[in-house]
């Protein structure tokens, strides 16, 4: 699961077509509403199958804590290290350990059977290109009933490189 933060670059184009309540949950200041978008369907799947493990790849420490609350700390796997964005690397903002974590996250993310990722995340997009893992792009493909997108409804792009 790739969970982004305010430092990611994204353009609002496709988001303008979303229902207002979904757009508010995605863009608003309510961290619980945003976490619901990211975690709801994974929580439904984990409830149906107790063997499911939730891997969180993020540069947002708060979302890791929310995931542990939603799924239980024993079900959540994270790579230890600093929560650093993988782009715009600089010695002032990044550490070697944090960047190694970002690389390990990227590799492990591609190994998942199903990934919920934010649509602007090139990081999540490329991790999936490596293995062909299935993805649900949040918020465009979010479905309250947790139906997976079909070949005709999937979006095929990300919007930054």
Image (cartoon, rainbow, N blue to C red):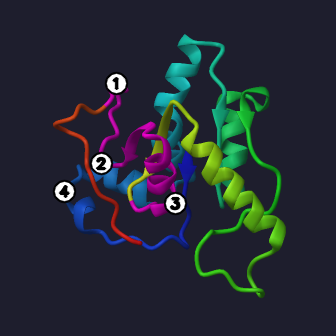
Q: Mark 1 points at which residue?
A: 145
Q: Is disc 1 placed on a helix, strand or loop? A: loop
Q: Which of marks 1 and 4 is nearer the N terminus?
A: 4
Q: Nearer the viewer, residue 33 or 7?
A: 7
Q: How crowded is mark 2: few (under 14 residues within 10 Å), some or many (20 or more)?
A: many
From the image, state whether disc 2 or disc 4 is nearer to you: 2
Numbered mark located on residue 123 in the image: 3
Disc number lying in front (3 or 2): 3
Which residue is at 56% across, 64% downward? Answer: 5
User: Which portion, as a residue range, is magenta?
Assistant: 120-148
Residue drawn at 66 percent across, 39 percent down:
67
State the residue in front, 158 or 107. 107
Q: How far apart are marks 3 and 2 (CA)?
A: 17 Å
The residue labelled by disc 2 is 140
Reading the chain from its start, which is encountered first: label 3 or label 1?
3
Residue 24, horizontal then vertical, whole percent: 36, 56
In the image, residue 96 lies in the stretch drawn in magenta: no
Please rate how many residues cluster around mark 3, counting C-alpha atoms within 10 Å: few if below 14, some from 14 to 19, many from 20. Answer: many
Q: Quarter of the image holding residue 98?
A: bottom right
Residue 156 placement (x, y as % from top left): 26, 51
Contact (CB < 8 A) between labels 2 and 1?
no
| Residue placed under numbered mark 4 in the picture | 17
Q: What element carries label 3?
A: helix
Kindly report the distance in space between the C-alpha atoms of the residues bearing marks 2 and 4.
Answer: 9 Å
Q: Give the mark nearer the N terminus: 3 vs 2.
A: 3
The N terminus, quarter of image: top right
- Looking at the image, residue 131 sits to the left or right of residue 55; the answer is left
Is residue 141 a member of the stretch shown in magenta?
yes
Above or below 95: residue 111: above
- Give the mark, 4 or 3, whose residue is nearer the N terminus: 4
Q: Gap in Å between the C-alphas at discs 3 and 1? A: 27 Å
Q: Mark 3 or mark 1, which is nearer to you?
A: 3
């Amino acid at each position: 699961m790739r969970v982004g933060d305010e430092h990611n670059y994204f353009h609002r184009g496709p988001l303008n077509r979303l229902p207002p309540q979904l757009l508010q949950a995605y863009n608003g200041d309510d961290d619980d509403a945003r976490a619901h978008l990211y975690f709801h369907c994974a929580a439904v799947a984990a409830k149906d199958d107790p063997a499911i493990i939730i891997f969180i790849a993020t540069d947002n420490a708060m979302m890791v804590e929310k995931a542990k609350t939603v799924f239980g700390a024993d079900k959540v796997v994270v790579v230890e290290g600093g929560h650093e964005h993988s782009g715009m690397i600089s010695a002032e903002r990044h550490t070697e350990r944090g960047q190694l974590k970002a690389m390990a996250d990227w590799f492990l993310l591609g190994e998942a059977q199903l990934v919920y990722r934010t649509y602007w995340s090139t990081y999540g997009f490329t991790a999936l290109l490596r293995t062909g893992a299935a993805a649900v792009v949040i918020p465009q493909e979010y479905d309250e009933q947790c139906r997976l997108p079909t070949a005709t409804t999937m979006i095929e792009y990300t919007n930054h490189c």
